[in-house]
Amino acid sequence: MKLFIVSVLAGVCVFTSAIGEALDSQTGSTPSHQEQADKPWNVTIPFQLVNKTIFLQVVVGSRPLWFVLDTGDKYAIVDLSIAKSLGLELGDQVTVGGGGKQAVMGNFVKNSSFHVDGLEGFSQPLFLAVPLDELANLHGHEFAGVLGFDFLKNFVVEIDYLTHILTLYDASAYQYRGDGESLPITFNAAAHPEVRAQIIDDKGSAVDGTFVVDIGSAATLIMNTPFVEKQGFLQSGRPTVHWLEGASGGGVGGSIEGSVGRIKGFKLGPFRIDNPVTVFSQASSGAFASADAQGNVGAGILEKFKVILDYSRKKIIFEPNSQFNKPLEYNRSGFFLTSSGQNYKIFTIKAIADNSTASEAGLRAGDILTIINGHPSADYTLSQLRSMFQDAKECDLTVERGHEHLRVRLTLRAVI
């Protein structure tokens, strides 16, 4: 996920170089990690992996909340409605952009901080309050905030996707002794880490590029619009479908137009991932319309590794895990689900792909899933349902459409 400040309402642009001054003026004297901690860190923290996204338990005041860990973000961000419910002091309004073409209104946060459950003696200021309720519905999970660069830079951060364990090491004392591959990174103007990688085209040729490493993105690989056009990815005759996730209209910045298909390979250092599911952006504005990088590497690839982020030494270490050779699959149902309601247990079809098993079965956007393979839909989480529709061969569904209840049998198939 990409998130960046666009402008203050007064019309003054906020660039990265000016953020430090804004932080000083907006957050008051809230102590930072560096001011508090004089002991080395070596802490393991469990996380929840929901739709390939890392959720950590964070405490604001005395309230435990679920925040997302995201290399595609710089500042500590809290949901605006939660900030108001907690009585946090809000400062000036600010315009915030994300991956989409729209921007949303948020506020600076003053004199408020967070600490991470299990990380004693550490706290940092909250910087922004932004509406995140659509992201909660897209994940089917409380999405109370985001931790990004300002948190990650304090540690060497080891992410074990298989055990769902995050380990935070003291950066000054850290020494890597594993067998993984260390790759250099740079940071763009928004403090997102970037790595050099190679696209393998249909003829086997390698095309070098710079890619944002984005653990907050559930996608596998996203190509930015200028790179898509330069390489002619959508003129090659490759099978593609409309990217349902991008068309769903949710998330910070709104929808992102694009098509999804496959490329022959993606090479990250010595590691080659064959036939990765790839989004070919057709965005005309926003982060994925930028020519500054060629694209985004998301959790669909990153979860094949134990990932070690060493920002102080400007490197990322990749250790392939037991899932490295597992083929990358894409949604086989032909529809995209979102959630709503108490505990995110109402599952609504938000978008449907043309010429898919869902469209052929007569399903429509707006249908609500009530029964799945004989079980009430509330027995599942949204993350479980998405995994089911990615891997299953057949599903029996009952959907609610207005006052009707319709039974549908889906024979799921690959669409790309």
Image (spheres, grey):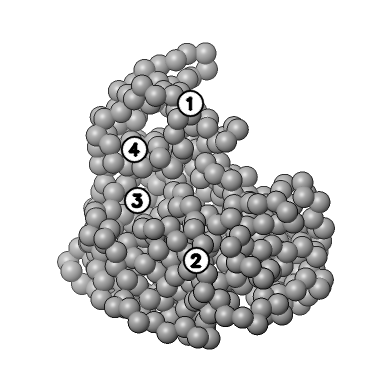
In the rendered image, the vertical position of residue 77 relative to residue 389, given as above or below: below
Gap in angstroms between the C-alphas marked 2 and 1: 39 Å
Q: Earlier in the sequence, mark 2 or mark 1?
A: 2
Within-10-Å neighbours for mark 4: few <14, some 14–19, many 20+: many
Residue 214 in view in this figure:
no
- Residue 191 rendering spot, x and y as whole percentages: 56, 74
Tag 3 residue: 260
Q: Single out the mark in the foreground, 3 or 1.
A: 1
Residue 368, labelled with which disc?
A: 1
Q: Earlier in the sequence, mark 4 or mark 2?
A: 2
Secondary structure, mark 3, is: strand
Q: Earlier in the sequence, mark 3 or mark 1?
A: 3
In the rendered image, the vertical position of residue 152 relative to residue 56, given as above or below: below
Q: Amino acid at mark 3?
A: Val
Gap in angstroms between the C-alphas marked 4 and 2: 33 Å
Tag 4 residue: 389
Q: Earlier in the sequence, mark 3 or mark 4?
A: 3
Q: Single out the mark in the foreground, 2 or 1.
A: 2
